[in-house]
Amino acid sequence: MTLAMTPQQRRAFDEDGFIILENLLTAAESNRLAAAADEVVARIQKEKSLPRETHFQVRNALAQHDAFLDLIDHPRILPLVIDAIGWNIQIRTTHLDYRPPYPDDLEAGAVGSGKGADSEAGYRNTAWHPDLASPEIFQAPSLDGRLPFMEIKVFYPLFDMTESGCGNLWLSPGSHLRTPAELRDMDREVPPDQALELKLPAGSAVVWRTAVWHCVGPNQSPKTRKIMHVGYHYRWLRPGDYIQQDPDLLARCSPIRQQLLGALPGSDDPLGADSHIAPASQYWQTRRTDVPLRAWAESQVEAADKEHTPPSATTTHLANATTAPKPT
């Protein structure tokens, strides 16, 4: 079942580990997200009495502003997400990365080194790494030393990241097929011919396997780096930045959004109908009513078959299927 991914995109996703989608969002959507980032950051800075030049991440950002919530089931991205990882998914993380420019007198360390005066000053010069492979956070199971496919992220630049040196995301194509041990043996130094610095306009998106080796370069531009990451993984895994979402948030969401937010829309008992005799987590023993994204995806394929059109031509119905009414 394919909803939107082209054969060329499938090959890139499997071989390189990522798909680049320039100008996925409209200018209005991108501007709304950038304004939401400024609003959320300003509120947190005020609450915590932080200086304006503070750089930080906001985790579970979808709960901070509806602009971020609207990204999780965006009608132009969710079909690709389903093609990449399937329909039995939920959000693992949503994080806003907000990094003002470096001070003029701060010398940047080498890209991907995690070392240098900038790191010593508290600026994140992120070293090359795959996600889910840090013994300090979580040591994932391996397959011949390689990380299993457990999640993807969608990377959204909320500012024009079209030049080098503005906090760009760097990826090493094909590195998801290599082992984290190999990267450690390389002292986390990726040769230039194995590294790609992404230079993208605001409103673009990158769908990528988080096992791909990646890092973040220094922000030596006059711009503030504003990035949203939306991470999707399987429902039988635990999310990274929430245990349960706020009930009021869930109550105003559609069934598909409820699924993505880790709820069980169709279950009276999360351990199934016979929970007192044979409990079975509905995150594992899934029913169609608990996974509305499955029914929606299958309906898109059926509609396309009847019309003899690619499923991607019908996925605009997603907006009606997943967008919750705005609170009054």
Image (cartoon, grey):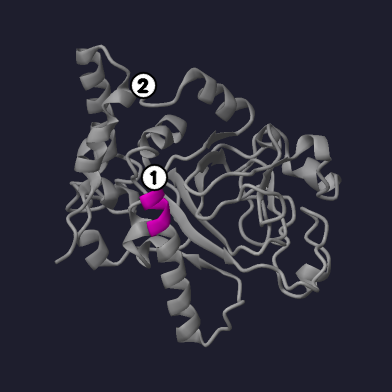
1 or 2: tag closer to the N-terminus: 2
Residue that badge 1 annotates: 26
Q: Is residue 47 above or below residue 66?
A: below
Front residue of 35/182: it is 35
Q: Residues within 10 Å of mark 1 (few under 14, many from 20)?
A: few
Q: Residue at x 58, y 26 (%)?
A: 12
Q: Main secondary structure of the magenta part?
A: helix
Residue furthest to the bottom in view is 49
Q: Position of residue 202 (x, y in %)?
A: 51, 49
Report the mark closest to the observer, 1 or 2.
Answer: 1
Q: Quadrant of the N terminus?
A: top left
Q: Nearer the viewer, residue 261 or 311?
A: 311
Q: Quadrant of residue 192?
A: top right
Image x and y of residue 142, in percent: 65, 40
Image quadrant of residue 52? bottom right
The disc labelled 1 sits on which kind of residue? Thr
Q: Secondary structure at mark 1?
A: loop
Residue at the image point whose x is 33% and y is 52% from the top: 70
Residue drawn at point x = 41 percent, y = 44 percent: 25
Residue 1 disc label: 2
The C terminus: image quadrant: bottom left
In the drawing, does residue 110 fall left or right of residue 70?
right
* Local SS, label 2: loop
Decide whether residue 127 is among the magenta residues.
no
The answer to whether any part of residue 70 appears in the image is yes
Looking at the image, which is closer to me, 112 or 157?
157
**Relative to residue 122, is residue 250 depicted above or below?**
above
Separation of marks 1 and 2 at Cα, in angstroms = 28 Å
The stretch of residues the image draws in magenta is 26-32
Number of numbered tags placed on the structure image:
2
276 in relation to 181, above or below: below
**Quick check: is 28 in the magenta stretch?**
yes
